Image: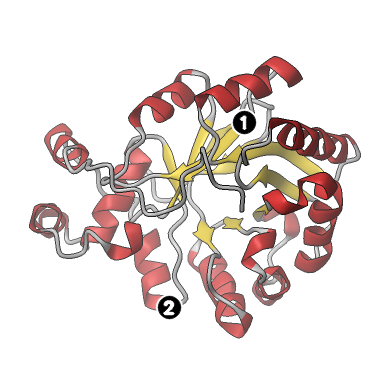
Amino acid sequence: METKPGMMPLLDGTEMPRYGLGCYASYGHEISQAVAWALECGYRYIDSAAMYANEKDVGEGLRLAGLDRKKVYILSKVWPKDYEVAANSAQQSLRDLGVDYLDCCLLHWPGTEEKRRLSAYEQLLRLKDQGLIRSVAVSNFQVDQLERIKEVFGAYPPINEIELHPAFQQRELRQFCLDRGIALVAYSPIKRGAFMGDPRILSIGEKYGKTANQVVLRWHLERQQIPIPKSSHYDRIRENFDVFDFSLTPEETQLINSLECGGRRGNDPLTYNG
């Protein structure tokens, strides 16, 4: 049984850790310390974004941890309002984070204007050619939008970061991505702790000596989804990472699968423009 996340190969020939720390809605020393703690606990993937307005603080956390840059996978995202100047936005993230390259940069939302979306993707590909970005990918893209990227640029994006948790499994989109080798990063993977009191998940956790959140995070891993739970508390950061010493049975996995209820908690990618 694995004792650490391991790496997931990507369509573009790179690879990324199978587990990460989300950085949304945390600022100042709180997020700097969270990043440093996460890296201390064994996380090797930090998921950031320009819109989070905390990338300087995330960068400070990277410096506090003191790890070799090559040992940390750093991902950022460009916000839709900046798509006309996507390259500038990505380079600002580099400056704020204090690094000389991004392992990956995503388009944060597809937006409703295809021309802007495709232009932004092309700008990021140029930065990749310059060595400033290792991978160019997307977030919240739907099937038609992924197909359009393939049609225009000749390849699917290697990553699609989407809302995924037991209450909102996006089964059609998930299967489309898995069938084509597009890695799925799951944001809001535990739906802000929504399953902590679910007796069915608690029962599974009791069997393994794990919390409900740990059971759900393990469910993600076994479904080839890369969870990025967010916390600013050391004990919770460590707890969230302690999910590599047990496996769910097929029956337990099916029980968690049955919790689907269409419970999206974020924005609708088909209408949201940022």
Q: Residue at x 61, y 48 (%)?
A: 273
Q: Is residue 139 above or below residue 203?
A: above
Q: What kind of colouring is applied to the model shown?
A: secondary structure
Residue 84 sits in quarter = top right
What's the amino acid at mark 1?
Answer: Pro
Q: Residue at x 86, y 53 (%)?
A: 88
Is residue 273 toward the left or the right of residue 258 in the image?
A: right
Q: Residue at x 43, y 28 (%)?
A: 173
Q: Is residue 112 above or below residue 152?
A: below
Q: In the orientation shown, which residue stands out farthest toward the bottom?
A: 29
Q: Is residue 35 above or below residue 251?
A: below
Is residue 183 toward the left or the right of residue 205 in the image?
A: right
What's the amino acid at mark 2?
Answer: His
Residue 125 sits in quarter = top right
User: Mark 1: few, some, or many residues within 10 Å (few <14, many ≥20)?
Assistant: many
- Which residue does the numbered mark 1 point to in the structure image? 158
Query: Picture coordinates of residue 129 (x, y %)?
Result: 88, 34
Q: Is residue 190 above or below residue 224?
A: below
User: Mark 2: few, some, or many residues within 10 Å (few <14, many ≥20)?
Assistant: some
222, 142: nearer the viewer: 142
Q: Which mark is residue 271?
A: none
- Count of marks placed on residues: 2
- Which residue does the numbered mark 2 point to in the structure image? 233
Q: Which one is earlier in the sequence, the residue at label 2 or at label 1?
A: 1
Query: Picture coordinates of residue 252 (x, y %)?
Result: 14, 40
259, 65: nearer the viewer: 259
Quadrant where the N terminus is found in the figure: top left
Residue 245 shows in the view: no
Query: Picture coordinates of residue 49 (x, y %)?
Result: 65, 58
Mark 2 and mark 1: Cα distance apart in space: 31 Å
